[in-house]
Amino acid sequence: MEKKSDKDSSSDDALVKILSGPTGNSRRRRLSWYYAPSFLLLWVALFYAIVIPLYNRLPDRVTVADESQKPGQFVAERAQRQLYDFDRIGPKVVGSIANEVTTVAFLVNEAEKIRAEMRSDLYELEVDVQAPSGGYVFIDMVNMYQGIHNVVVKLSAKSSQSASYLLLNSHFDSKPSSPGSGDDGTMVVVMLEVLRQMAISETPFEHPIVFLFNGAEENPLQGSHGFITQHKWAKNVKAFINLEVGGSGGRELLFQSGPNNPWLMKYYRTHALHPFATTMAEEIFQSGILPSDSDFRIFRDYGDVPGLDIAQVSNGYVYHTVFDTFEAVPGRSVQNTGENILALVRAYTNATEMSNPEEYDEGHAVFFDFLGLFFVYYTETTGIVLNCVIAVISLGLVGVSLWRMARVSEVTAGQISIWFGIILGLHVVGFALCLGLPLLMAVLFDAGDRSLTYFSSNWLVIGLYVCPAVIGLVLPLTLYYTLKPNGQLSHAYHLHMSLHAHCVILAFLAIVLTSVSLRTPYLCLLSMIFYSASLLVNLLSTLHDRGYYWTITVQCLQLLPFCYFCYLFYTFLVIFFPVLGRNNSGTNPDLIIALICALCTFFALGFVVQFINMFRWPKLILLGLGVVTFIFCMIAVSDVGFPYRPKTNVMRVNFLHTRRFFYEQDGSVSHNDSGYYFDYQDRRELNPLKDSSVNLSGLARVEPDCEKYVMCGIPCFYYSWCSQRTRAGWLPRETEVVLPEVELKFELLGKSVSESDRTVRFDYELAGPPHMNVFVQPLGGAKVEDWSFVRTMLDEPEEFSAPYQIFFSYGKDDSPLKFYIVLSKSDGDFESPTLELGIVGHYVSYDYERDPEALEFIKSFPDYVHVMEWPSIFKRYIY
């Protein structure tokens, strides 16, 4: 063995002294500052070496050639062949030939192919093309549909006597311009292959399966409502799996479950081959932060059916764009989803709980996967007990540790309590700064019109938000240790108390958040378990009182929670990065990203970054992090920070080329014009286009018109558009917009006045393109007493107020919509203006041509812009 040099021996002796007991001059010895960058980079390396590969891990694709060697497995290649054909149909807008005829025929044909392969001695397969009509209140609008299409397939075993059905749902319609191969073509073909595998299986299942391919989800959620409220098989559905895509590819996230019925999660834990789920995603989605909704809401609210909501969430940049194509969907993602769904379907169709789910309605579940390696689930009640018990145990261990410090350091319990109280207070300040500094960065960048700099260059968040969060979390205690050293207590003990303070904050958060019925405090639970375990090991051994040796145990046991929290919050960043490019212009999107990064820092590094104070010159280390932040800020305001890239990270611009007519009470036209109505999609609105070739001269907000006309005089499409109408833009156009031949026809059929109860009834008929709106605004003190639409808005005036929105769409049935409105007036004067109506027609699909000037305007946008547009007409009437 090579003999160590004297220099090496002296270095080892110095390290031993630094890590040794809390007495003598070694009390305040620390590691040299130049080890700190290596220490911090180690955790960054762990993130890229462990978290990212596990997050992106996908199974190999099974091909048709492999099928004979892998019987019963999901075959992604076959699903991809179907997806190719689905993609080539093109955009599938409700009311278009592509959606109502071509895609319906495609799905029926695929079902018949499966029938031909089916084990007809074991199974029965029924195909039904449903064309429902109906309506309901969705968010703050009446959502009406007429003759839309659902393709419904039921597969049942001939030996089964069960009347309890499992429902699988996906949708085949898409946004205009998007072929919808990701959203939701991927899930359509996954369902087709699952149907095929179940139909050729040699092992029959107990409960029948209903495969719902719904044709009107983007409208929104009309197809699922038509099925669950009207279809003959709906009353037998006892559980469902809703399949969605919020991007293209990646793993599918289980982000909603229930309501109640935790048995669903029990089966997911046992049978999902590639688990990916978190309770936190469910609570975030249901809070409304994301500008999306799913058919899960409809099955839950209108069918009272429990189920799972599952969606692929990667590459949300192509969501609802022309780039959501077959080529953007990886085969391994299809395989991952298919294997999971096939396994779940096999499990649920043989589950005893399906016979009577009400018996197993035991409350919500807490659930999460750990790096995709395994799945954890327990009931909400168990979670409450665990959160409280572990919090108490953690606080108890902290108390024992403080008592031990006092005894070893020969100080009183009162003194150690005061010192710990100071450290705890400073750590609370650090927690506030951990959140506050990243949020301040978000505010400053937004104020400088530099929001979304991370949109394409995601790595910028490390310097912009993570480094400030680390600085904020550590700075107060660093200043305290530097400016007010305590000679009665070793620095190792001081450092240990800072970690105790973090544990106390976690315990407090766990108890408070649990008390308000949140399930997300499982994050605090995980942190406390691993820190308490390390603290217990240190207390039971001699490490607790041997200088810095206890830090080894803490750091080793922090590896797992660090990886998990990075994995979890990275998932949310993957979701939110692209989402914030379509989250409207009314809120600062950087605040959300800053908050995610701050919370990630707090949970993943809360026990780790305090070790910065174990090194000499910790203020210099924090200054270095500040320099990193400054460098990243300079990069962010350069061209690197420009949010958009062609094809991969596009800027979304939604506008309607609109013809407007404003009719007065006497029938005369007071104003008519043409222009482009912009519904802004992100915080920057159209500012990035100021120096482009797009002619935006004359662009102005419509807000001044909001007091003059119903719904600001613009043809806002549905609730999300109308809610942002005051921020919308209007660009006048000198020439008239040339509308398609299908005319928007609106006729007053009759007016009848009842003098006894001082009411008036108007009867109308509306006909036009497949998407239309009716905006209702009472005038002159009038009140809407009744109408032929769903009454929910009128029955709940504390929640809904004028102007009322009625959204109406149809599939192939273009028969006119007849409706009436009854109003009352205290003075009974119905000769003066009583009612203002906005009547809108939308020519959404490419079955309708755009005029040449509009096409030239569309072409003028830069290549990093994705345009979603269509012609529309707005007519205002006064009665």
Image: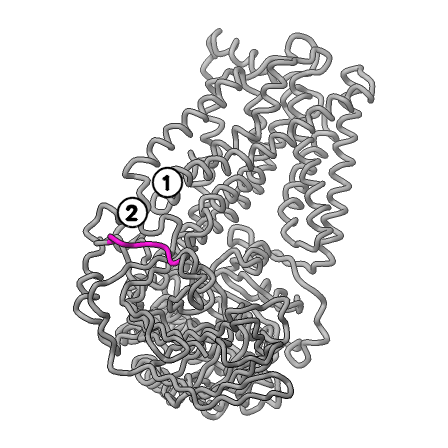
Residue 790 coordinates in the image, percent (x, y): 56, 80
Residue matched to label 1: 450
Q: Residue at x 33, y 71 (%)?
A: 670
699 drawn magenta: yes
Q: Secondary structure at mark 1?
A: loop
Location of residue 410 with respect to 162 vertically, above or below: above
Q: Nearer the viewer, residue 637 or 192?
A: 637
Q: Main secondary structure of the magenta part?
A: loop
User: Residue 310 colored magenta?
Assistant: no
Give the percent coordinates (x, y) of residue 255: 54, 61
Circle 2 crowding by C-alpha within 10 Å: few under 14, some 14–19, many from 20: few
Q: Is residue 722 above or below residue 485?
A: below
143 sits to left or right of 326 = right
Q: Which residue is mark 2?
A: 688
Q: Position of residue 458 (x, y in %)?
A: 38, 43
Residue 504, placed above or below residue 56? above
**In the rendered image, which quarter is residue 798 located in?**
bottom right
Read off the magenta span.
696-702
